[in-house]
Image (cartoon, helix red, strand yellow):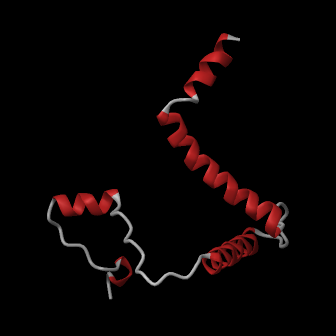
Amino acid sequence: MAQRQRLRTEQQTFEWKTRYAVRSGVEGTVNEFVDGHAMRRCRYRGQRKAHIQHVLTAIAVNIERVSALPATEEAPTPRRPTAFQNYLDQREITRPKSWRTLGT
């Protein structure tokens, strides 16, 4: 009983709610795959085919989500830099605009 009370009080903290917000977002996405796109069982046999099914289903879900967004006239806000990009910026190391262009 004491542990249950301790866990309930811990759930009221800002840090716990921040961690749980990430988890709930992930679980919502998994639930969307399972219930909305019948991903509980794989349609194909073999790891390669199953992987292709998962990737294509993820692309379809992303397209559905983007198409459901309301149209806006203003430009979207840019994403915050990653920890690695901050590391490069702090050391004044130039980084290419796209990492995919490296080696070409």
**Residue 74 spot, x, y in % from top left:** 42, 81
Residue at (35, 77) in percent of width and height: 99
Relative to 46, say whether 1 is above or below: above
Report the residue that reaches farthest toward the bottom: 104
Answer left or right for 15 relative to 99. Answer: right
Q: Is residue 39 visible?
A: no
Residue at (33, 56) in percent of width and height: 83
| Position of the N terminus by quadrant | top right
Judging depth in this view, the residue of 75 and 64 nearest the camera is 75
Q: Is residue 7 visible?
A: yes
**Residue 87 picture quarter:** bottom left
**Residue 78 spot, x, y in % from top left:** 37, 71
**Residue 90 spot, x, y in % from top left:** 17, 58
Residue at (71, 70) in percent of width and height: 54
Relative to 99, say whether 34 is above or below: above
Answer left or right for 102 relative to 57. Answer: left
Report the residue that reaches farthest toward the left: 92
Answer left or right for 22 relative to 95. Answer: right
